[in-house]
Amino acid sequence: MYTETFKLREPPFRLSPDPQFLFLSRAHARAKAYMESTIWFADGFVVITGEIGSGKTTLIESFLRQLDSDVVVAQVNQTQVTAVEFLQSVLVQFGFSPFKMKKAELIATVNNFLIEQYAAGRKVLLIVDEAQNLSLKVLEEIRLLSGIESTKEKVLRIILAGQPELNEKLDQPELVQLTQRVRLRFHLGALPRDDLRAYILHRLDVAGANGRTIFEEDTFAEIARYTGGVPRLINTLCDTAMISAFGEERDRVTLKDIQSAVSELQWVEYAARASTIAAKQAARRTASAGGEDYPVRALSKVVLSTDGKAVAELHLVPGRKVVGRTPDNDLQIDSKFISRHHCQVITDSDSVSTIEDLNSTNGITIRGKRVRRHTLRDGDVVGLGQYEMLYVNHGVAEHLSDTHDELQPIDADAANEESGDDEREDAAGAR
């Protein structure tokens, strides 16, 4: 095994979740803090989403290891179930044998258990992983469970974790009551370049590298190019590259080993792979909707401008649209004054849109005042750093087209060059 060649105690890039290898990037640390908040505040759901392989399960396992003994946990991972099967799964986690119970008895048993635990001074936590697979009926059961309360407070704490589709599901009009109970929502994105390097070095040190150079410096950019910063893909590529170096009887991984591993895995660059996956997902959604790609009528839109010049439009249909700096947003603004995921606009079937700050650094403003959440009215102007975003409601703007436009990212630096407004850029940077 290559561990002897690299003088390591164990393989550093296993794919199975292992809390001792958890690397707390800024995003992972924040997500974990949100999870920890459920222990002290029982007044709403916490929702954690992330792409496949982003580290959600490892984060959950690390969080569970650090819980106090007075916390009773039910962890449900099998989510393609009926409402009755879900309630049975929860009760099994609590030590019951509920398989002959009818639904009314299942609900009564859960209620009694929660009240008993509260009376005994214990906290009860329900964690549902892969929650994007839950049916609307099961999500409604979870909402009802969340309403169980003592005379002072709710008695069940709930964390929902899943892939990005979970956000799409929660934003459906049928789940508006549940969504109103979501207290914190956070998305785990891919690791940026600096965190990717730190992630690899962290796992090597946990495995026994003790600061020794094992991956040469020029390998990290190539790893980022082919993994997109997704932890599981990083593990796969790094492990394969170490095997390649081992085969060449070297105790360092070179750029040649990374390229050899990429060839062996038959990978293309991550950006190209992500585009292919997105296209396939869109095709599946079209097929599930009836097999034909009918245009969705835009209910409203936002118009993005800088220095009084409109630079982009985003048409809004029912659901959630995210605005931020990185390419995974629905509207990308490539500016250092915009956070990676800066804000979101949620539109319901009645064309009511709400904008919400996603804990961004510089925030959002309405009429010069910073706000966290605001129900938009026709003509509202939202401040985003150097940009303004005008909200236009379809009811008074018949000129809207019937399709959802595909928008290009905004290059803030190019816009600033055209305007020549260097002083305003400096002022914004100072803020």
Image (cartoon, rainbow, N blue to C red):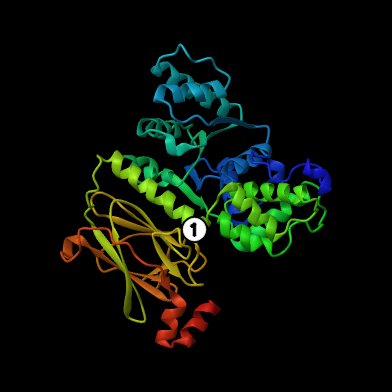
Q: Is residue 300 above or below residue 127?
A: below
Q: In the image, what residue occupies the spot 29% across and 58% down?
A: 316
Could you say whether the residue bearing mark 1 is in a helix, strand or loop?
A: helix
Q: Position of residue 425 (x, y in %)?
A: 49, 82
- The quarter of the picture where the N terminus appears is top right
Q: Where is residue 132, by image quadrant?
A: top left
Do we see residue 172 in this rendering?
no
Q: Which residue lies under the disc numbered 1?
A: 271
Q: Mark 1 is on which residue type?
A: Ala
Residue at far top of view: 100
Q: In the shown orientation, is residue 169 left or right of residue 217?
A: left
Q: Where is residue 418, by image quadrant?
A: bottom left
Mark 1, other Cα within 10 Å: few <14 / some 14–19 / many ≥20: few
Q: In the shown orientation, is residue 332 left or right of residue 190?
A: left
Q: Position of residue 262 (x, y in %)?
A: 60, 52
Please state which of residues 204 and 354 is positioned toward the viewer in this rendering: 204
Please state which of residues 237 and 382 is positioned toward the viewer in this rendering: 237
Residue at far left of view: 398
Q: In the shown orientation, is residue 58 left or right of residue 371?
A: right
